[in-house]
Amino acid sequence: MANVTVIGAQWGDEGKGKIVDWLASRADAVVRFQGGHNAGHTLVIDGNVFKLSLLPSGIVSGTLSIIGNGVVLDPWALKGEIEKLESQGVTITDDNFAIADNCPLILPIHRDLDGLRETAAGSGKIGTTGRGIGPAYEDKVGRRAIRVCDLAHLDTLEPQLDRLCAHHDALRAGFDQPPVDREALLAELKEIAPFVLRFAQPVWKRLKKVRKAGAKILFEGAQGVLLDVDHGTYPFVTSSNTVSGTAASGSGLGPNSTGFVLGIVKAYTTRVGSGPFPTELDDADGQRLGERGHEFGTVTGRQRRCGWFDAVLVRQSCAISGVTGVALTKVDVLDGFDTVKICTGYRLRGKIMDYFPSHAADQAEVEPIYEEMEGWSESTAGARSYADLPANAIKYIQRVQELIETPVALVSTSPERDDTILMRDPFVD
Ligand code: GDP
Ligand code: IMO
Ligand code: MG
C-alpha cells in the first residue's frame, strides 16, 4: 500500500493538518478531496504557525499539492490564502499546486444564503462556518453550479449564470433580499478568473501520471466522519461525504488507489457548532481540556465544546470509514488529570446501546456509560518515543485501541511537526 488516506474520525479538528504535514515529506503528492475553506488545519514547524483552509497541508513542505474535484472552491478565499502563505515564505506555483478544473465554485451568493438561513433558524441553527459550503454543494448536485472550467468561457456564461441566479433570486425573495446583481457577479468572476485558471487542469490525468510513476499519494480529508452528510449527526453535519471512500470520487482515482486509511483521533472529544455530543462536559474538567488543548476554532475562532473520549463513536467511525490504523493526537492535553474517563457504551431510555443511533432525538438523549482510569502526573508533551510515555498513558492508549477495535499507528504529543511517535508506518504497511 503506497498511498495513505487521512480522515478525521470525530467532529473535525483532530489534528489532521499536523499529521498530513508530517507525512507529506514522504509523499509525492497531497490531495484534498472534499469540503472547502470551512476546514482549518494548523501546522507548527519549528515554532512557525501555518493555518490552512483550502490548500492541502503538503504545500508547506513543498510537496505537489492538488485540490480535487470533490472540493468546493471559493476563488477569493484561495487568493487570500495563497497570498498569506507566500508572505510566510511558502512557494506556490503551477509546478507544485493544481486545481481540478471540474471543481464547483463557492460564490458570494452562497455565503449570503448560508448566513440568511442560519440567522432565520435562530436557536435551531447548525452553527455552520458561514462559508457557503452547504449552498455551493446544493448547486453542484442541482446541476446549476459554475465550475472552475467555466472561468475560461466567461463570454458564453450568461445562460448558465441566469439559471443559477433565477434559483437564488427565488430563495433570496423568501428572505426579503434583493435579486442577485448579475453584472457585478460576472465582473467579479472576470477579475478573479486568470488567478484561478493558472492552476486549473484535469487533475485526474496528472494523478494518473503520478500513480503510474509509482509515486506515493497522500489524500487529505477535511472535517470528520461524525460530520459526514450520510453517516454523521444529521442534520448537524457538513454538506459533503467526509469518509475515506470520498478520496477516490473526489480526486478522480479509483477506490483501489486510496491505500492505508489513517483515522485521526483526538485523545478526548471536541465539537464546534450545534448538535448532539454525549460526553460533553460543562464542568471544570471540560474547561481544563479546552484550556490545555487551546480549543478555539481555526476558521471562526469559536470556542470548541469539550468532553471525554467516546470510544463508541470512534469505533463506529473506524468501521464506516474502513480505518486501517489511527493517529492518536493531543495525548499531552490529558497530562495531570487524576483520573480520565472513556465512554464505552450508552444508555437510551433504560436500554444499553453499543452504537450511536441514527435518529437525532435518540442521539440527543443517549447517556454515556464511563470507564474510569487512573491519570498520569508526568508530562508527555514533546515525547518522541513510545518508551518515553508514562505507564498510565500507555495503558490509556492501549485501552483506546482495544475499545475502538483498530490499531494505533501514530501518537502525537504536541502541535510541533516532529513531536510524533511512529509505531506503524502507513506508507509501508
Ligand atoms: P485539523 O482540523 O484536524 O487539522 O485540526 P486543527 O488544526 O483545527 O486543530 C488541532 C489543533 O491542535 C491545532 O491547533 C494543532 O496545532 C494542535 N495539535 C495537533 N496535534 C497536537 C498534539 O498532539 N498536542 C497538542 N497539544 N496540540 C496538537
Ligand atoms: P476541519 O477540517 C470542525 C462544522 C461546523 C458546523 C458544521 C457545518 O478543520 O476539521 P459547514 O460550514 O461545513 O456547513 O458547517 O460542520 N465544521 C467543522 N467542525 N472542523 C472542521 O473542519 C469543520 N468544518 C465544518 O462547525 O457544525
Ligand atoms: Mg480544524
Image: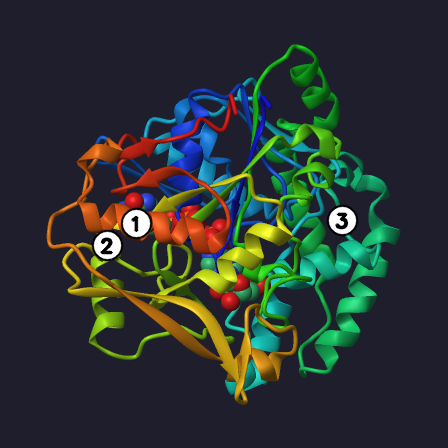
For the point 51% across and 63% down, which residue is it? 313
Mark 1 residue element: loop
As rendered, which of 346 and 128 lies closer to the eye?
A: 346
> Percent x, y for residue 399?
36, 53
Q: Is residue 130 visible?
A: no
Q: In the image, 249: left or right of 364?
A: right
- Residue 330 - label: 1
Q: CA distance from mark 3 to mark 1?
A: 40 Å
Per the image, label 2 sits on a secondary structure element best described as: helix
| Residue located beneath label 3 in the image | 146
* Residue count near mark 3 (Cα–Cα under 10 Å), binned few <14, some 14–19, many ≥20: many
The dot on residue 333 is: 2
Place of residue 413 in the rendered image (x, y in percent of width and height, measured from the top left) = 26, 42
Q: Earlier in the sequence, mark 2 or mark 3?
A: 3
Residue 316 visible somewhere in the drawing: yes
| Residues under numbered marks 2 and 3 in contact, where contact means CB atoms less than 8 Å apart | no
